[in-house]
Image (cartoon, helix red, strand yellow):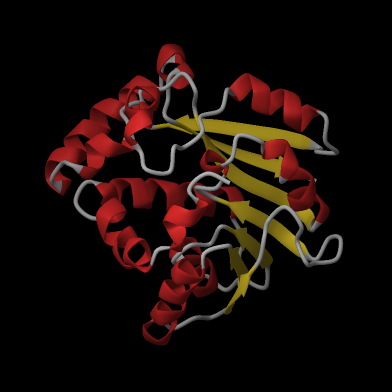
């Protein structure tokens, strides 16, 4: 999987949150978390599996909202960073971590209400290898995001150290239509690439996001948006 070795490095795990979600990157963090909150809606007592949990950016939020969260990742360095956050974070739900490969999940069918996989599919050119497992262990909903092949991200994608994979929304729809999904919901965000926001001071980035939001509200803006958020009801 693309980026697998890169994310295993301790120095990458140590710098991950700071380099991606400080300054203007705070807007990315806020928007992603708000999307997850909107798509899940009710958290108390929910059993949630987070695939590619990383440093527990989402897992901590979900556990604070009352969910029982199991986070899996193939990077022990990222998991260790997530574990370090727990002592300073009062939780109303549970948060546990497991070193595991998402292509063969060690759980029984329908073990979780919700399966969440944010910042995952840009690491693989073959989502069809992972979606069946995600659907198998979920009893209610699967939520994930993809980076759009027609977005501005494609202009700088070649410089990313993990060589992230961009996906066509049309291909994702075709793939999902061949599953047992009862409904498929998709929304788009961020016309400008994430890399631009990370380089901007927070207040200036807020002004850019205001313009960005107007652009992604148009049909053209939606087509060329950086990220698509998907919610699949089982």
Q: Position of residue 219 (x, y in %)?
A: 46, 14
Residue occupying the point 24% across, 39% down: 197
How many numbered marks does the figure carry?
Answer: 0
- Residue 123 appears in the figure: yes
Compare residues 233 and 148 and report the one nearer the observer: 148
Residue occupying the point 23% across, 35% down: 196
Looking at the image, residue 105 sits to the left or right of residue 151; the answer is right
Compare residues 48 and 121 and report the one nearer the observer: 121
* As drawn, 168 above or below 4: above
Q: Which quadrant holds residue 93?
A: bottom right
Residue occupying the point 76% across, 35% down: 183
Looking at the image, residue 129 sits to the left or right of residue 148; the answer is right
* As drawn, 20 above or below 106: above
* As drawn, 144 above or below 217: below
Looking at the image, residue 162 sits to the left or right of residue 172; the answer is left
Return the residue found at the far bottom. 87
């Amino acid at each position: 999987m693309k980026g697998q070795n890169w994310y295993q490095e301790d120095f990458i795990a140590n710098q991950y949150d700071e380099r991606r979600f400080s300054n203007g990157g705070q807007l990315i963090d806020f928007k992603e978390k708000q999307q997850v909150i909107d798509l899940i809606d009710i958290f108390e007592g929910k059993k949630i599996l987070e695939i590619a949990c990383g440093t527990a950016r989402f897992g901590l939020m979900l556990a604070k909202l009352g969910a029982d969260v199991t986070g899996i990742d193939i990077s022990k360095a990222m998991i260790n960073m997530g574990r370090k956050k727990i002592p300073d974070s009062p939780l109303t739900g549970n948060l546990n971590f497991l070193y595991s490969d998402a292509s063969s999940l060690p759980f029984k069918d329908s073990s979780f209400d919700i399966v969440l996989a944010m910042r995952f599919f840009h690491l693989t050119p073959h989502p069809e290898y992972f979606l069946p497992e995600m659907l198998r262990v979920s009893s209610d909903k699967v939520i994930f995001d993809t980076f759009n092949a027609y977005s501005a991200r494609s202009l700088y994608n070649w410089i990313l150290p993990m060589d992230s994979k961009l996906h066509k929304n049309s291909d994702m729809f075709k793939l999902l239509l061949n599953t047992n999904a009862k409904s498929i919901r998709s929304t788009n965000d961020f016309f400008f690439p994430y890399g631009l926001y990370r380089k901007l001071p927070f207040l200036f980035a807020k002004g850019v996001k205001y313009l960005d939001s107007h652009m992604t509200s148009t049909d053209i803006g939606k087509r060329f948006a950086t990220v698509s958020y998907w919610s699949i009801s089982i």
